[in-house]
Image (cartoon, rainbow, N blue to C red):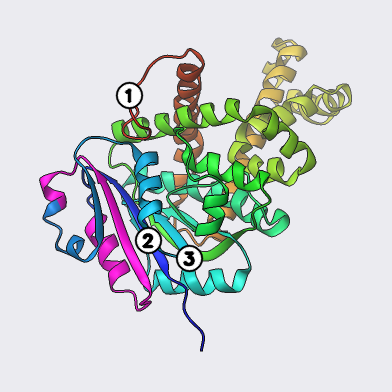
Amino acid sequence: MVVSPQVSVIIPVYRYSEGLRDLVSSILSDPYENKEVIVVVDEPSEAFYRIPEIRRCQVIVHEKRRGKVSSLNEAVERSHGEWLIFLDADVIIGKDFVSKAVRYAESSNAELIDFIKLGTSGNLIERLATFDYAMANLIFEASSRFLKRTVFLDGAAFMIKRETLKRLGGFDQVFSEDLELGIKSYSNGIRYSMSNITVYVRQPSDIKKWVEQRFRWAYGMAEWSFRNFFRLIFYVLINPIIIISALALIVPPVTSLGLFYLTSAPIINNVMMLYMINPLMKFYPTLLRLPRRDLLFYLRAASVLGGSFAVSITTYASVLRHYRVKYRAYDLLLYYFLYQPMLLLVYLLGFAVYLMRINVELNWKVEKG
């Protein structure tokens, strides 16, 4: 007789989440029987207590803020499952999610299971944010396929064996506890697998909330990057697939730099002069008034921008098609010309604030000290 492993589904909440009721309902209605649902909440609001499904869960309440990391570690201590599934309260799961996750885990021979994460397809911000998740999935998928380990981890939804998490020492008191767990799993040779199960993560509904969320991510990534700087450099050097897969996230600047280098080569300049600038002058004699050096500069600039745009848009469209994400043609333009520059500025700000050691309040990520 095959005994189904016990699964503990752990959901951390700060005050209240609009999607919490649907998430808990989906888990409780899953036919997989050998499961427990643990909801750990800091400073719960009145709306939290009005969720009827909460009564069927094990609820850990902190009237004062403890922080997400402390909440997660406490929930793990109180759980009983052989497998632990961690879900953020804003995640949307599909039918029979727990059943499918357990089947995949039992057949994969992995200790750390990841899920494909995509954003919701609502307003413009939500649609464009979905592109970020699709691009990030490439890194996780490449790590799963070629390395069977991962340096990175997105904590919105993942599954790990209890004994494995215990061996890794649980969650550390850092802002990006998921990234920290990922690099610890790599250092300890934990077997990682990216499943074919998709979950959807609700996105901020307005630009202010989007900036606040991405700023928190940037600050946490800065802390994680400098905390593990030498280890990261070493892992990238011995496993180039990490940086190769990550290039999809930085296609525009990488493409632009590459094209700028190519168009700066003397042989390329001569070819452009011979086959592009000289014919243009024949058809448009007014161009003769401009120095050829200026014409070459403008042509190089156009080549760099046009080439970067073409490569980037093609890459985005291919990745979105791979993950079956529906999008509108103009979404690609907005993502390239508007969303990515804004995202870069927010991330630079997050890194700058961390480096300048400015004390900031970043929601409930870590315990107040």
Residue count near mark 1 (Cα–Cα under 10 Å), binned few <14, some 14–19, many ≥20? few
Please name the residue shown 35% across and 77% down the image. Answer: 33
Query: Which picture quadrant has residue 318?
Result: bottom right
Query: Which picture quadrant has residue 244?
Result: top right
- How far across and how far down the image is residue 307, in percent? 67, 36
Could you tell me if the residues under marks 1 and 2 are in contact, i.e. CB atoms within 8 Å? no
**Is residue 23 rendered magenta in the image?**
yes
Label 3 and label 1: CA atoms lie apart by: 35 Å
Camera-nearest label, 1 or 2: 2
Instruction: Please state which amino acid type lies under the numbered disc 3.
Output: Glu
Given residues 288 and 196, the one toward you in this image is 196
Given residues 280 and 369, the one toward you in this image is 369
In the structure shown, which secondary structural element does the residue marked by tag 1 occupy? loop
**Is residue 150 rendered magenta in the image?**
no
The answer to whether one can see residue 133 in this image is yes
The span picked out in magenta is 19-48
Query: Which picture quadrant has residue 105?
Result: bottom right
- How far across and how far down the image is residue 31, in percent? 35, 79
Q: Earlier in the sequence, mark 2 or mark 3?
A: 2
**In this figure, which residue is indicated by the disc labeled 3?**
82
Camera-nearest label, 2 or 3: 3
Depicted 41 relative to depicted 300: above or below: below
Camera-nearest label, 3 or 1: 3
Instruction: Please state which amino acid type lies under the numbered disc 1.
Output: Glu
**In this figure, which residue is indicated by the disc labeled 2?**
9
Q: Earlier in the sequence, mark 1 or mark 2?
A: 2
Could you tell me if the residues under marks 3 and 1 are in contact, i.e. CB atoms within 8 Å? no
Please name the residue shown 44% across and 33% down the image. Answer: 175
In the structure shown, which secondary structural element does the residue marked by tag 3 occupy? loop
Asked if residue 226 lies left or right of residue 200, the reply is right
Please name the residue shown 37% across and 35% down the image. Answer: 365
**In this figure, which residue is indicated by the disc labeled 1?**
361
